[in-house]
Image: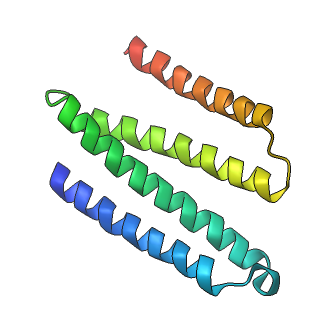
Amino acid sequence: MTLREYIGLLAIGSITAIAAWLLVLFFFDPVQSGMISIVAFYLSLFIAIIGVATSIGTSLRVVRFPKRDIADIVHISLRQAILFAVLIESALYLVRLEALRWWIFLIVLFILSFVEYLFLLKQAKK
C-alpha cells in the first residue's frame, strides 16, 4: 500500500467517523437511549480523533522528514494520535463526571507524556 492510498483510506475512515459522531450528537437523546448513545458518542469521537490526528501527523512528518522511512512515520503518527485521543476522551469523561480540574488534567497529561517517553526510549534502543 502506498502512502497516497493509506492517506486516502484514512481520510475516508475519518470522514465516516466524523459523520457517525455528528449523527450521534444530533439525533440521539442520551436520556432516552441510555448507555448505547453514550458509548456510540465516545467511540465515534475516539475513532474520528485518531483518524484526523494520524492524517495530520503523517502528512506533516512526510513533509518535514522526506528521507525517513514511511512505515516509521505512520507508526509514530498513529501512536501519538491514539495518545491524543485518550487525552481528549479522558477530559470529556471527567467533564461528564464533573471531576475535571486543572491539576487532574495535568496528571493525565503527565501520564500520557510518560507513556510516549517510554516508547521513545524503546525506539532509541533500536
Q: Is 61 drawn above or below residue 6 in the view shown?
A: above
Q: Position of residue 56 (x, y in %)?
A: 33, 47
Q: Which residue is located at x 54 percent, y 81 percent?
A: 23
Q: Which residue is located at x 74 percent, y 55 percent?
A: 93
Colouring chosen for the image of the structure = rainbow
Asked whether, in this view, residue 55 is left or right of residue 64, the answer is: right
Q: Position of residue 90 (x, y in %)?
A: 69, 48
Q: Which residue lies furthest to the front in this view?
A: 102
Q: Can residue 7 be seen in this view?
A: yes
Q: Which residue is located at x 29 percent, y 35 percent?
A: 73
Q: Is 58 drawn above or below residue 21 in the view shown?
A: above
Quarter containing the C terminus: top left
Q: In which quarter of the image is residue 42?
A: bottom right
Asked whether, in this view, residue 8 is left or right of residue 44, the answer is: left
Q: Which of 50 and 122 is in front in this view?
A: 50
Q: In which quarter of the image is residue 43?
A: bottom right
Asked whether, in this view, residue 83 is left or right of residue 101, the answer is: left
Q: Count the labels in the image.
A: 0
Q: Where is residue 69 in the image (x, y as percent from the top left)?
A: 21, 31
Quarter containing the N terminus: bottom left
Q: Where is residue 41 in the image (x, y as percent from the top left)?
A: 63, 70
Q: Which residue is located at x 72 percent, y 71 percent?
A: 38
Q: Nearer the viewer, residue 100 or 117?
A: 100
Q: Residue furthest right?
A: 98
